[in-house]
Image (cartoon, coloured by chain):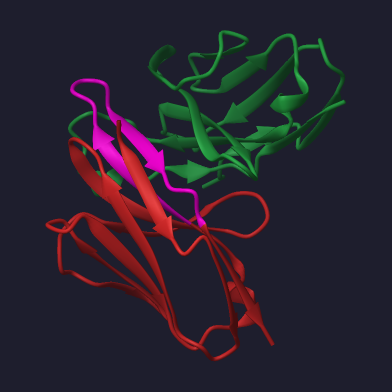
């Protein structure tokens, strides 16, 4: 079974630009979560999508948005980039089914997209 | 607000040493506690713990959960340089009909010297 796939692996942008990151979850997983990881802040939760709906949201500004498609693939968009947006963006997927046993809802991560904002 | 704390934040040991990493949490609607190892990019899953007192073991790694005292430990015996990584602790909480939420700790950076 293929793992979580994120593209691109690396991105260099300048301030004010926008960027779109993509995540393909493990087959059968309907929940996709996005995280920002920086040396100072650790893993910060951005949002979670399930069945094309945002189900959960962290404390990030509206410049960070996402969406999920019917095949469970997800995209994350950051508009008006700032220097502080430089980070590793990780996507994670799990089955996401309410009522599943905990053992069926392990979150698996992709390799991430390293975004550098100059 | 849900919170996960890990200690120490950084640890340097020599090959062959045994290490214990700590994770404590304060959350509502606890569901499970997970340990991940992050070497360069993707955190890789190590263990999931849901019940107190039951040790999970995989090779030289083991972990246990104490739901009364709200903590977990990850033990690594006979450490090797390949164990050098950041070890992340995460707690999954139930959110009514909205599935799970995962709260991560800051991680423990383990460096194993030859």
The quadrant of the rendering that contains the C terminus of chain B is bottom right
Q: Is residue A108 above or below residue A58?
A: below
Q: Is residue B73 above or below residue A7?
A: below
Apparent colour of chain A: green
The answer to whether residue B100 is visible is yes
User: Residue B96 magenta-drawn?
Assistant: yes
The answer to whether residue A105 is visible is no
The residue drawn where x is 49% and y is 49% is B106
**Residue A106 in the image, given as x and y percentages of width and height:** 36, 46
The residue drawn where x is 38% and y is 39% is B103
Q: Is residue B16 above or below residue A72?
A: below
Apparent colour of chain B: red
Q: Is residue A94 left or right of residue B111?
A: left
Residue A11 found in image quarter:
top right
From the viewer's side, name the closer residue of A64 and A50: A64
From the viewer's side, name the closer residue of A60 and A111: A60
**Residue A22 in the image, given as x and y percentages of width and height:** 65, 25
User: Which region is colored magenta?
Assistant: B88-107
Q: Residue furthest bottom?
A: B16
**Residue B113 in the image, given as x and y percentages of width and height:** 67, 82
The residue drawn where x is 39% and y is 75% is B75
User: Residue B76 magenta-drawn?
Assistant: no
Q: Main secondary structure of the magenta part?
A: strand
Q: Is residue B81 left or right of residue A98?
A: right
**Residue A114 in the image, given as x and y percentages of width and height:** 74, 37
Residue A15 found in image quarter:
top right
Count the numbered circles shown: 0
């Amino acid at each position: 079974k293929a793992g979580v796939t994120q593209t691109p692996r690396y991105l260099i942008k300048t301030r004010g630009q926008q960027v779109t990151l993509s995540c393909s979850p493990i087959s059968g997983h309907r929940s996709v979560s996005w995280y920002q990881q920086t040396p100072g802040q650790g893993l910060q939760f951005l949002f979670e999508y399930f069945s094309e709906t945002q189900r959960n949201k962290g404390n990030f500004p509206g410049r960070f948005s996402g969406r999920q498609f019917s095949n469970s693939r997800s995209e994350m968009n950051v508009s008006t980039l700032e220097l502080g947006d430089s980070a590793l963006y990780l996507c994670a997927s799990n089955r996401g089914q309410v009522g599943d046993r905990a053992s069926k809802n392990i979150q698996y991560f992709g390799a991430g997209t390293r975004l550098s904002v100059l | 607000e849900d919170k996960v704390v890990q200690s120490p934040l950084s640890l340097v040991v020599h090959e062959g040493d045994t290490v214990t990493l700590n994770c404590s949490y304060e959350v509502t609607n606890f569901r499970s506690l997970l340990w991940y190892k992050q070497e360069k990019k993707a955190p890789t899953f190590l263990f999931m713990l849901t019940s107190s007192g039951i040790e999970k073991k995989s090779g030289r790694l083991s972990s246990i959960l104490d739901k009364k005292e709200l903590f977990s430990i990850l033990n690594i015996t006979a450490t090797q340089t390949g164990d050098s990584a950041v070890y992340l602790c995460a707690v999954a909480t139930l959110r009514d009909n909205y599935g799970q939420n995962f709260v991560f700790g800051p991680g423990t950076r383990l460096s194993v010297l030859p």
